[in-house]
Amino acid sequence: MQRHFSVPANFESSIAAALADFKLTLTDSKDLAKCVLALSDFFISQPDGQTPWHESWAQVAYLCYYLPLNAARLRAVIGEGEKRGFFSGLEDVLDFGAGLATASLSLSETQKLRYTLIERASEPQRLIEKYFSYFEAQEWTRTFSGGRIQNPRRTLALFSYSLTELSDLPEWAYDCEALMIAEPSTQQDGRKLLELRKKLLEKGFHAWAPCTHEGPCPLLNQSKTDWCHDRIHFDAPAWFQKMEEQLPMKNRTLTMSYLLMRKTKPQPIPAARVVGDTLKEKGKDRQMICRGPDREFLAWMHKHKIQQEIPRGALIEVPESAQKVSNELRVAQEIKVL
Ligand SMILES: C[S@@+](CC[C@H](N)C(=O)[O-])C[C@H]1O[C@@H](n2cnc3c(N)ncnc32)[C@H](O)[C@@H]1O
């Protein structure tokens, strides 16, 4: 029932080939880990800083660590979008701050669209064109101004971990039919994304995922600390696990905060999304859900002897028989995960 993601085989062989440029292999765990630590330290000390693509350690770190991790997160987000038909009718993608084309590579696995990659640094384009040649970009550009959007009503503006380097969405993004935004799943960035949801709703966009409704977000409005994020399991290949042994951060599960929004209204969704991990309490287990402006929890009373742990981020059917007690929906049967 948990959602598992791994590194696709074609990614792995492209990463291995690209590392050879730096006289490294996937099994040089210590050297790879040193590069990852250097880039991680850079992001921690300069959270709003520009990715230092001119440094070979940054390129190595992105190839062997951030690319596979972000691609797994994005595949999960894309899967949620596909379940709802989010990409239907779209033809063009503008991938802003594309880096190693992480998001476009991931989306192109299942969606045949025209990909324009906007990336101020030149190094990522060189690596992708040389080692990920199965991915065909329509165009790479260092800068972009909205004047060039040919078909805004069929265009998806894609921001994958690239908003942190900006203060707001660029103006042209508001003209596009669809927006896919993934941001680091930290409290600060996650809550900023919920503020952006509010602004986008005011500007006429509709929420397709993760939201199941367009009311005020309960995580933002009824808590000062919550932020919306899903969790997936990352089945790391052996070389990744070896490298990770040298690192302080572990990645058996990954979280992601995202927004899928379009100007077209989605079909109403008669479901709730699980937005919390299991909380073990005296006499009951609880998980937070979202289906409207209220902060609500599913509650499994231990006396009913039903044990269920629903993956954070899954859509569920709330049984009509659930008994509402304060902010709890007490369930006496297995919940159906959609
Ligand atoms: C953290 S990286 C994310 C890369 C990739 N999208 C991913 O998901 O892995 C952010 C990228 O945005 C690029 N970037 C930031 N500001 C930009 C701008 N104004 N124009 C083009 N690229 C920009 C940076 O060079 C960097 O490659």
Image: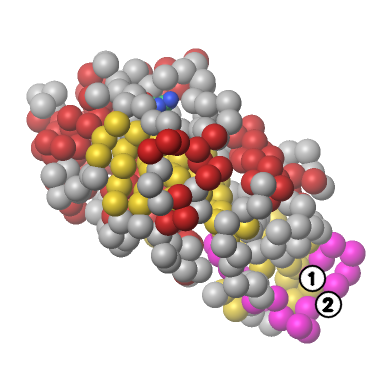
Instruction: State the quadrant of the C terminus.
Output: bottom right
Ligand 1 lies in quarter: top left
Q: Amino acid at mark 2?
A: Gln
Tell me if mark 1 has few (under 14), some (14-19) or many (20+) residues whose alpha carbon lies within 10 angstroms of its own. Answer: many
Circle 2 SS class: strand
Query: Quick check: is 90 in the magenta stretch?
Result: no
Measured as percent of width and height from the top left, residue 79 is found at 43, 62
Q: Identify residue for label 1.
A: 329
Q: Which mark is residue 323?
A: 2
Above or below 31: residue 199: below
Measured as percent of width and height from the top left, residue 16 is found at 14, 39
Q: Which quadrant of the figure has residue 317?
A: bottom right
Circle 1 SS class: strand
Label 2 CB-ligand 1 distance < 8 A:
no
Residue at image coords 19%, 53% = 9
Numbered range of the magenta stretch: 303-329
Which of the pair 301/111 is nearer the observer?
A: 111
The reply to whether residue 285 is visible in this rendering is no
